[in-house]
Amino acid sequence: MSKTFLRITAALLASTMLVTGASAETIRWARSSDALTLDPHSQNQGVTHNFAHHIYETLVDRGIDGALVPRLATEWNIKEDDPNVWVFKLREGVVFHDGNPFTAEDVVFSLDRARSEKSNMRQLHVGIAEVVAVDDHTVEVHMTGPSPLYPNNLTNTFIMDKDWSEANNVVEVQDFAAGEENYAVRNTNGTGPYTLVERDPDVRSRLVAFDGHWAEKPQIDEIIYLPITENATRIAALLSGEVDFVQDVPVQDIERLQSSDGINVTTGPENRSIYFAYRMDDAPLKSSNVTDANPFANPLVREAIHLAVDRDAIQRVVMRGQSVPTGIVVPPFVNGWTEELDAYPAPDVARARELMTEAGYPDGFTVTLDTPNNRYVNDEAISLAMVNFLGQIGIQATLASRPVAQHSPLITANETDFYLLGWGVPTFDSEYNFNDLIHTKEGSYGAYNGGLYSNPEVDAMIETLGTEVDLDKRNATIAAIWDIVQAERMLLPIHNQVLAYASRGNLEIPVHPENTVLMHSVTLSE
């Protein structure tokens, strides 16, 4: 019996001893993976943000309808007579978990920390010139130019306690890629509706409602958070009553759960696309038998791969209908998406083989395909299907599967030749994709540009988006950038993700477009 299985079993038994089932007091919440870290500015990653939203808070939030809603800021507006300045009015009477009062100085500290060199969130704040505390409850964010959409960038930027951070030597953000730990990785002090009382990474965390929170008391008093990687173990735990809510329901289990007494299943589209990307610079690949060139740098090879992939087969066989095949790496939620961009070619293996020959690779080549195996719906199975499609045109891909905690650093550290990634868009605007996936990897840009694509003309176009106030002109630039991205086949879109949640008894949670389940907003039915 594996050590991991024993740890999961022990965590479940401990939960069972603590509580007796779903109630107004406790929910046992299972996911396929854990938060990568508790340092709120270290990783721009959905699971990590979802967990943090219970402990920390943002200035603005995103409702289930996609609209911005107040959280620590009660109102925000562009300063009269100065289009370069955003003014945020802060909620009064808010305290951190240790009792410290929340003030404008905490916002200044947190935004400066989030845009610092080691932060994985810095591209969201690249347009900031200076953050100023006007008084205890007013903050001005001075931008380098007019930034009419800036509040959209704040939905996952969490506010920390300046005094607590200084006292615990966490003024600087954790260097996640270097494997660094700081005090904020396992300890927290937010203003959120829950406090962290127990943390065993990848096994079990426990949160309890914060009596001093400014909002109405949540119906869920206690959260037992249980990362369970194995699909079968996670679903078995739900059916046996050992957990109350499963956020990552495998597609093969949806029908069975829907017909199970006492189980509720909700499904819905997520604002996230699943895609593959490849190294596109001139240096030879690290994992290929072609040692004097990079085959992926050849546009004919990229076109051949696009024609070899059967997205409809992935949707039908691998995803059992629970996905929306796409030709672009943004879902319809996002500004910049169009039906024309969403179209994708029918598979044409014969033409793909011709292109491989024209590119100089009639016998194909070898490469390693890196994939997560616990982050996205059927991520490893999608990659296995890709291996089979590529085999038809001579590309022999070796699958390398890892937990997302080990997979993500491969991309940010440029250590992968070919990889699967899922990309959500919390700003609901294409600029977010361009800043992180397309812009040259430098400074605050290109954190997830694992393909190392670099085009100064495209970079310049991207950089205008942050300060363009003419929305028609801005949207025209977005369309022009997408045209280049699509024509050069920088990314290989597969589908937009569809999610399924399952719960027991009187607990029913609708799918959030950003897959951000907020337990303090859950209402239990009678």
Image (cartoon, helix red, strand yellow):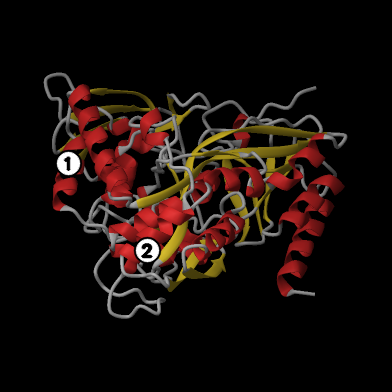
Residue 167 sits in quarter = bottom left
- Horizontally, residue 211 falls left or right of residue 338, namely right
Pick out the residue farthest to the top: 80
Q: Residue at x 54, y 27 (%)?
A: 215
Residue 175 sits in quarter = bottom left
Residue at mark 1 to residue at mark 2: CA–CA distance: 32 Å
Q: Name the spot of residue 41 as percent of width and height, x first.
A: 39, 52
Q: Amino acid at mark 1?
A: Met
- Horizontally, residue 19 falls left or right of residue 272, namely right
Q: Which mark is residue 183?
A: none
Looking at the image, is mark 1 or mark 2 nearer the viewer?
A: 2
Q: For this rendering, which residue is in front, 238 or 272?
A: 272
Judged from the image, the secondary structure of the residue bearing numbered disc 2 is helix
Choose the circle earlier in sequence order: 1 or 2.
2
Q: Amino acid at mark 2?
A: Met
**Answer yes or no: do the residues labelled 1 and 2 have beta carbons within 8 Å?**
no
- Horizontally, residue 19 falls left or right of residue 488, namely right
Judged from the image, the secondary structure of the residue bearing numbered disc 1 is helix
Q: Name the spot of residue 468 as percent of width and height, x first.
A: 17, 30
Q: Say whether residue 39 is visible.
A: no
Q: Name the spot of residue 205 as percent of width and height, x first.
A: 64, 55
- Horizontally, residue 239 falls left or right of residue 281, namely right
Q: Residues within 10 Å of mark 1 (few under 14, many from 20)?
A: some
The relative height of residue 94 versus residue 417 in the rendered view (above or below) is above
Look at mark 1 in the image and give the residue it sits on: 461
Q: Quadrant of the C terminus?
A: top right
Q: Name the spot of residue 86 as percent of width and height, x first.
A: 23, 29
Q: For this rendering, which residue is in front, 35 or 85?
A: 35
Q: Residues within 10 Å of mark 2 (few under 14, many from 20)?
A: many
Q: Which mark is residue 356?
A: 2
The relative height of residue 168 versus residue 318 in the rendered view (above or below) is below
